[in-house]
């Protein structure tokens, strides 16, 4: 069934635009996943995006995941709270000294604790270590309700908005088969 989806494109053109939000939590750790691991990346993708219609990569084979991850342009940074994966940010270096925040989000049980602002801050700081011209991201009306506000609060500026129909299944795919929204 086609649904109108609005996509917002945001950018940061100077590292000084970043408005950091860091929290002091003794059990919070953010680490780079330096070994390409399709199983772990797919777990993060499905667990974070399952409630928000993140479907594009669900059909990828293990080989396709590995080919995507095993490139120097891609970095995955994972937030852990008390040793448990809480969320991630995936950065992709692009031509012309740009970095895209390809994916970003938290697992549902970690939303609302200030972790998103912290993880996004750390991810943007890392992106600016690679980028010299621009860090950009897009989010849409299917993403979590705090996504756009978090990007804007960290200093990203809107540069484009597009609305287009998208065919969606009757409910989001969830993190595993048989999952039901809100269950």
Image: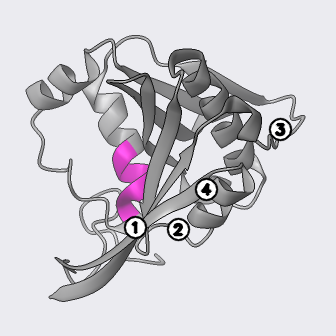
Residue linked to disc 2: 144
- Mark 3 or 1: in front is 3
Tell me where the magenta segment starts and ends, as one range.
Answer: 45-50
Disc 2 or 3, which lies upstream in sequence? 3
Residue linked to disc 3: 22
Which picture quadrant has residue 96?
top left
Element type at mark 3: loop
Contact between labelled residues 2 and 1, with CB atoms less than 8 Å apart: yes
Q: Residue 127 at x, y = what percent?
A: 55, 26
Res. 157 mark: 4
Q: CA distance from mark 4 to mark 3?
A: 20 Å
Q: Does residue 42 belong to the magenta stretch?
A: no
Q: Residue at x 54, y 21 (%)?
A: 132
Rendered-image quadrant of the N terminus? bottom left
Disc 4 or 3, which lies upstream in sequence? 3
Magenta part mainly helix, strand or loop?
Answer: helix
Res. 52 mark: 1
């Amino acid at each position: 069934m086609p649904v109108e989806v609005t996509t917002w494109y945001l950018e940061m053109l100077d590292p000084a635009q970043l408005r950091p939000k860091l929290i002091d939590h003794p059990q919070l750790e953010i680490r780079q996943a330096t070994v390409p691991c399709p199983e772990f990346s797919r777990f993060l993708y499905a667990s974070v995006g399952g409630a928000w219609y993140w479907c594009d990569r669900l059909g990828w084979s293990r080989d396709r995941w590995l080919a995507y991850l095993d490139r120097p342009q891609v970095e995955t940074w994972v937030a852990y709270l008390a040793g448990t994966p809480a969320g991630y940010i995936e950065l992709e270096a692009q031509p012309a000294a740009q970095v895209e925040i390809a994916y970003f989000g938290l697992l549902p049980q970690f939303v609302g604790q200030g972790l998103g602002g912290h993880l996004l801050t750390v991810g943007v700081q890392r992106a600016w270590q690679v980028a010299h011209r621009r860090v950009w991201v897009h989010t849409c009306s299917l993403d979590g309700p705090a996504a756009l506000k978090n990007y804007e609060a960290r200093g990203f500026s809107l540069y484009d908005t597009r609305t287009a129909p998208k065919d969606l299944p009757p409910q989001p795919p969830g993190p595993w088969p048989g999952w039901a929204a809100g269950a």
